[in-house]
Each structure stands twice: as structure tokens, then as C-alpha cells.
Amino acid sequence: MKIFSEVDVPMAESGAGSVCWVPLRMWRAGVNPVNRAMRWMGTGLLCMATLSLAQQPAEVWRFDRLDRIGGHATTIAGHPQIIHTPYGPATQFDGLADGLFVDVHPLAGDATWTWEVIFRPDADGAAAQRFFHLQEVDPATGEFTRDHMTLEIRIVDNQWCLDSYATKNGIRMPLLNCKLLHPLGQWYRVSFVYDGKQLRNYVGDALQGAADVQLAPAGPGQTSVGTRINKAYFFKGAILSARFTPRALPPGEFLPLPKTESSAPKHR
């Protein structure tokens, strides 16, 4: 057993079978050094990392209610709406003032990761829109740092292209390819993947961009959905679900679009 300080969260040392102490404040802030295999004990956390990286579960957020996402309480800006879609309930954002905020960073502590979102970008939105933002927070001051990740779209000729961005410790890596355009008003799965060496983004299973980069794991923080964390660049469209996996997935393991309600089996 090893005791770690509040600023020392070494995921690589928390392998299968190891035991470690993690400060409760970091757990509440969203840091997850051994990826969701933890138990609270007293003033700290006893981490029993019995799962390998390949076995550790993903965190799924379903946007079927406004007051909670993925078990986390939300703060609501504007008037987002729960709507009915062929895939079930989703949250619709008006592109003007709607947003949801969660006091957790779902990829904090992950050295490799896959971030997927099933969403529908709608027509008549702004030219640049942020639909998901993971923002790090300085645990000493409570202030936002410069380190964050975003999923964004750009509107070109009444179509959209995917813009993904990650910055950590002064390293900035955007992935934007507006030569690959997609129709508005349809449902898509987008994926942002980091394998420890290369950052990639996808629309469906189609690679949109890739770049070699070394990024340290994210720290604790917050999340905004439907807007940038500072309430700017609002998204017009709907979001069905998101999934955060603590490893780099190949396209064959990406989150599938759910069956439509018309194709779901009928129960008598």
C-alpha cells in the first residue's frame, strides 16, 4: 500500500491488485485514478483495482432528463427540452441560451480514453458551436485552468464538419477537417479517441482527422453540454447519449446507434 498526496494521482501505479489512498475531495471532483473500481473508507478512498484496463467499465450518460445526467446533478441554463426521437428521449438545445452543467470531469485521470456522443446537429445554428466541453479546475483555487477538451461543429455551406480540441500543459491539438461535410438534421455518432500517442476523431466509423501528440491525463473539473463552459458558442440540436471509456476503442467497438422504437421488439 502506498499513500499518495492530493496532487499525486499515478494511474500507472494503480494496477490490478494494488491498493491506494486517494483524497475524498478528488473523488468528489471527478478524479478516478483506477477508473471506477473504488470504495470510500473514512476520510479517503481505498482503491481495489481488480479490473484490468481492458475490463474497466465505461460511463454512459443518457440525456433523457434534465435534472441528472449519468447520475450527476445538473445546473440548467436557458430552457433545454426533453424531446421524443426515433431512438427514445433526448435533450434539445436552442442554440441561443440552453445548456447543462455538471460538476464532474468524466475523463479525469484517464491516460487513454474514448469519448463518444450520439447527437443531431440542426439547421440555422451559428457558424461555430460547442456541444460538449470537459473543463479542468484548479483544486487549490477552484478556478478554471487552460486545460480542456471540446467537441464542436462548424457550419459550411449548410452542412457541418467535426471539430475536436484538446489542450493540456500548454500542448494544444485541434482536429478539424471541413473538407468532410455532413448533412444537418440527421443523427450521428462522433468519437474522440486518444491511445497515449495519437489523437483521432470520427463521424460514424469514418476517420476525420488524426495527429500524434503526448497528452497527460486530465485533472478534476466540470462539464458543460450544449455550450462552451463560459456560456458561449451555443449548440443548436439534440443530444441522445454520451459514453466515456478509459481506453482507446477501435471503430468496431464504438457505441452503436440504438434501435429505433419502430424496430424494437414488441412485448405482448
Image (cartoon, rainbow, N blue to C red):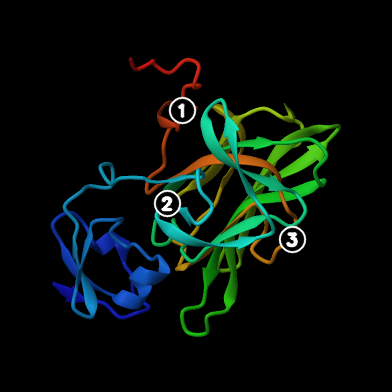
Question: How far is disc 1 from disc 2 in space, using C-alphas?
Answer: 18 Å
- Note whether 160 is above or below 230 in the view shown: above
Place residue 117 in its image quadrant: top right
* Image mark for residue 256: 1
The residue labelled by disc 2 is 70
Task: Please report whichever mark, 1 or 2, sits nearer to the chain's N-terminal start.
Answer: 2
Q: Is residue 155 visible?
A: yes
Residue found at the very far front of the displayed protein? 268
Task: Identify the residue at horizontal 31%, vertical 67% (top origin).
Answer: 10
Give percent across and percent down for residue 181: 74, 30
Q: Residues within 10 Å of mark 3 (few under 14, many from 20)?
A: some
Question: How far is disc 1 from disc 3 in space, using C-alphas?
Answer: 30 Å
Of the residues shown, which amino acid type is indicated by label 2?
Gly
Task: Please report whichever mark, 1 or 3, sits nearer to the chain's N-terminal start.
Answer: 3
Task: Identify the residue at horizontal 56%, vertical 39% (top origin).
Answer: 90
Of the residues shown, which amino acid type is indicated by label 1?
Pro
Q: Is residue 195 visible?
A: no
- Note whether 136 is above or below 151 in the view shown: below
Direction from residue 122 to residue 137 in the image, left or right? left
Of the residues shown, which amino acid type is indicated by label 3?
Ala
The residue labelled by disc 3 is 232
Give percent across and percent down for residue 176: 70, 43
At mark 2, the secondary structure is loop
Give percent across and percent down for residue 121: 69, 37
- Note whether 140 is above or below 87 in the view shown: below
Give percent across and percent down for residue 153: 71, 43
Indicate the quadrant containing the N terminus: top left, top right, bottom left or bottom right: bottom left
Indicate the quadrant containing the C terminus: top left, top right, bottom left or bottom right: top left
Residue mark closest to the camera, 2 vs 3:
2
Return the residue nearer the eye: 117 or 196.
Answer: 117
The reply to whether the C-beta atoms of the residues labelled 1 and 3 are less than 8 Å apart is no
